[in-house]
Amino acid sequence: MKILFATPECAPHVKTGGLGDVSAALPPVLARLGHQVRILMPNYSAMKVAGDVVASHDVLAQDQWPAAQLIEIDAGNGVPLLLLDCPSLYHRDGSPYVGADGADHPDNAIRFGFLSQVAARLGTRASPLPHWRADIVHANDWPLGMTPLYLMQARLADPGGTVAASVMTIHNLAFQGLFPMASADLLAVPWHQRGIDGVEFWGQLSMLKAGLQFADAITTVSPTYAREIQTGAAGVGLDGMLRARADRLSGILNGIDGAVWNPATDQLLPHRYGAQSLALKRLNKTALQARCGLQPRAEAMVFGVVSRLTAQKGIDLVLAALPALLAQGGQLAVLGQGAPALQQALLDAVARYPGTVAVSVDFDESLAHLIEAGADCFLMPSRFEPCGLNQMYSQAYGTPPLVNATGGLVDSVVDSTEASDGTGFVMPSADAAGFADALDRARAAFADRPRWQRIQANGMASRFGWDSSAARYVAVYGEALIRAGQPG
């Protein structure tokens, strides 16, 4: 199949979260399975892309959409990268979604509407790539949410033509791409698609809802999350629609890239190690303590956090438990950015507990890897977590994670109990009491070195590669083609 993987971010070029990692890891595995895969993303001004420019293709102006260029890059991994170059939309300060001031780019609707429109165009006769058009357009999260709608429009306008099937993946249902309904004019949404059976969500236009409403297939990033989002508690107002479309909704657990996240080969670590050389992991703990200004105490239980600093991620639970955690001789190393109040509370803790709490409010890939390798236990008490990747990284690095029983966390972490060693520690409830329970069990296991080493070994023996998940995506693509009326 010819598969277009359309995404707003892709590591290592630009990454704000797990979507960037997924966009980097899944397409090459699909290519190794024998499919022709292309990645489409914007050409952001601050982005550094390694690879050779193969060609530049014109994207002609069409109706209200501007002219642009598709820069084709050979990234050296078997998956050409297509950069949508439109300086007026994508050359600016800040992240893909917000400016340097932290506020959303005011024209995000047109920025990502155009990305969606070009993604759809690559699946039609109007494809700007000579000799290639997609059979499947795989759209990721709300920035590509308009893609299935545009493909449906193309199908209706060209009933005799071959138009790609659409697959919409939800990485986090809480981010829905909401804009004033007046944006429908800018985004070429006809009147009959502006109602509750179209893009409308409580009086606004929802790009994500557009994708879910018109996609030939829907996936999300773990089996448990696929069930959770069909309930009122986690469906963020879209649970009814998702229940109605349950026949085309699949939960496929994300994987991790073992070429990037492998302690035996990780070039970002000062000391590489494996399951048979766990003694070297302690050297990374010493390096982490030195880099973060933590007291060089080998006996201290070092807890690590690499996360957006938000209530969703349970950072307030970590803060509430911090005095008890430190009183037991623990240390805390945090990397992330997020809600100003939580961010400031963590920075205040650094001043209050010098040498035992370290916080880096930054994006630092090398420190993220060092925390995974150097910490003893990784904290991830998310109130909801569609999939999560850090709990998988942690297990691969022999750093048992402490997680809440939600989404992909419960799908990928086996609770350590008195009856079974497991691979980590699962909270019995998403509150302070549940966090304290899991924390007490983690500390008790850490004090029992043989048991802790068994838990580490179990985690390092877990397999979180992409092969089985990629095969499931291929099956979903086949189902989408059938629904779209094309040969599979």
Image (cartoon, helix red, strand yellow):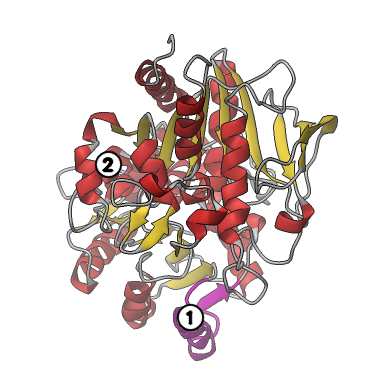
Q: Is residue 458 something one can see in this rendering?
A: no
Q: Residues within 10 Å of mark 2 (few under 14, many from 20)?
A: many
Residue annotated with mark 2: 226
Tell me the SS state at disc 1: helix
**Vertical arrangement, residue 340 with respect to residue 387, above or below:** below
Q: Residue at x 42, y 39 (%)?
A: 169
**x, y percent for residue 13:** 70, 47
Q: Residue at x 57, y 69 (%)?
A: 104
Pointer 1 or 2: first along the chain: 2
Q: Residue at x 48, y 63 (%)?
A: 182
Residue 302 part of the magenta segment: no
Q: Quadrant of the C terminus?
A: top left
Residue annotated with mark 1: 346
Specify the segment rendered in magenta.
338-361
Tell me the number on the disc at residue 85.
Answer: none
**x, y percent for residue 277:** 53, 39
**x, y percent for residue 120:** 56, 33
**Circles 1 and 2: CB atoms closer than 8 Å:** no
Q: Quadrant of the N terminus?
A: top right
Q: Residues within 10 Å of mark 1 (few under 14, many from 20)?
A: many
**Vertical arrangement, residue 176 with respect to residue 392, above or below:** below
Give the amino acid type for the residue marked by disc 2 in the picture: Ala
Of residue 329 and residue 369, the one placed in the foreground of this image is 369
**x, y percent for residue 153:** 47, 33
Give the amino acid type for the residue marked by disc 1 in the picture: Leu
Tell me the SS state at disc 2: helix
